[in-house]
Amino acid sequence: MFYREAGQFKSSYKEDQAVFPILQDRIGIAFILLIAFVGIPLFAGDYFIGAIMTPFLILALAAIGLNILTGYAGQISLGTGGFMAVGAFAAYKFATFTITIGSIEGTLPLIITILLSGVVAALVGIMFGIPSLRIKGFYLAVATLAAQFFIEWLFIKVGWFTNYSPSGVITAPPLNVMGYVFETPAEKYLFTLGFVAVLAMAAKNLVRSHIGRGWMAIRDMDIAAEIIGFKPLQTKLSAFAVSSFFCGVAGALWAFVHLGTVEPEAFGINRSFAILFMVIIGGMGSILGSFIGAAFILLLPIFLNNVPPMIGLEIGVDMVAHLEFMVFGILIIFFLIVEPHGLARLWTIGKEKLRSWPFPY
C-alpha cells in the first residue's frame, strides 16, 4: 500500500522487493504481454510476424545476454556473434544426434536441444572469459574479438559441425514439440516468444539477486568488490557463462526458428557489432533497454528504405546502407555523451514523472 508523505512515496520492504514494484510497470507489462501473446498472432500479417517480430525477439534475447556481460558486469565483448554461432551449431548437432534405448531410436526433444545449446555456449564463454581475470577494457575487447574470428573460422573449416555438408550450411529439422509441429509464422513467433519471455524474466530476477549485485560491484570497482567479499574469478566467469547461455539460445532460435538454415557467416563480426549497438542505444544495464535497442536497430533500415520514397526522395540500396552506418555512429556518440544509459533512461524519466503527477517532487 503506497501513501504520500511530504511529497514522497512510501512502501513496505516486500513491495520494494517485487520484480515490478510500481503499479504503472505492472499494468504496462500486462498490456504488453496481452498484445504480444494475443494481439499480434491474431491480427498481424505473416510478413510482419515472420520478418520483423520473430527476429526482433531473438536479437533482443542476444542483446540481453550481452547486456548482462557489458552493462551489468562491465566486461566488454565483441564476440556475441560467435557465441550465437556456437548455440546454433550445437543445437544442430544435438538435433541430429540419435539416441538408442534398446530397440527404440530417437532424438532429443527440441526444447532440451535448444537449452543444451545454450549450455555449450556457456562453457565456451567461460573458456574465452578466462582472460578477463587478467585484462580489461580495450584488451578484453580485442580478446573477445579474437574469439569471434576463431569460432567463425572453426565452423567454416571443420566439417564435423555441419555433418560434413559440402556447402557448410546447416538445415534445421522441423520444430516438433511433443508431436506438434510449429509451421506458420504465428506459431514460430509464439514459440520464440515463450523462450524470450521466460529468459527475460529470469534475467530480470538474476540481476536483482546476489549474483547480479556481484556483477555490478565488479563493474563499478573491482578492488572494492573483492574487499567486501565478491570473488572476481567466480563473478566474472559467471557473467560470461550466463551471457553466453543467452546468446547461445538466441543463436539456436535464429537458426531453427527464423531462418531454418544458416551458415557461419550469418554470425560474423557485423552481427556482434549490431548487438553491441542495440545495448548502447537501448541502454546498458537495462533489460528493457535490450528490447528497445533491438527494436530500434531492426526498424531503422525499414524506416530508411520506406520513408524517403514516400516524400519523393529516391535513395539507392548502397546509399541506404551508408546512411545506416552514419545514423548508428551519430546515435552512439550522442548517447555516450548525452545519455549513457540510452533510450531506457528516457523511458524511466518519463515513467517517474508520470508516477509523481500531479504532485512533482
Image (cartoon, grey):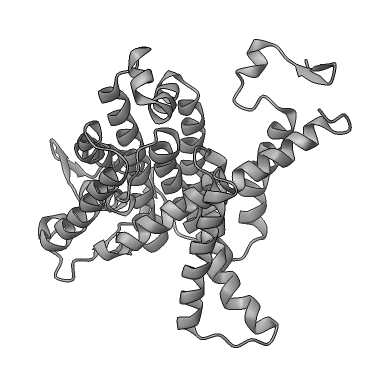
Q: Position of residue 278 (x, y in %)?
A: 48, 53
- The one nearer the camera, 214 or 20, is 214
- The one nearer the camera, 225 or 110, is 225
**Residue 46 visible (yes or no):** no
* Residue drawn 61% across the image and 55% down it: 41
Looking at the figure, which quarter contains the N terminus? top right
Q: Is residue 332 above or below residue 339?
A: below
**Residue 55 visible (yes or no):** yes
Q: Is residue 355 above or below residue 87?
A: above
* Residue drawn 40% across the image and 44% down it: 66
Q: Is residue 25 above or below residue 32?
A: above
Q: Position of residue 108 (x, y in %)?
A: 26, 42
* Residue drawn 63% across the image and 55% down it: 40
Q: Position of residue 59 (x, y in %)?
A: 45, 53
Looking at the figure, which quarter contains the C terminus? top right
Horizontal side, residue 137 vs residue 35: left or right: left
Horizontal side, residue 13 vs residue 151: left or right: right
Horizontal side, residue 296 vs residue 355: left or right: left
* Residue drawn 46% across the image and 33% down it: 203
* Residue 243 picture quarter: top left
Q: Is residue 123 above or below residue 309?
A: above
Which residue, as the protein is rendered here, is positioned at the far right? 358
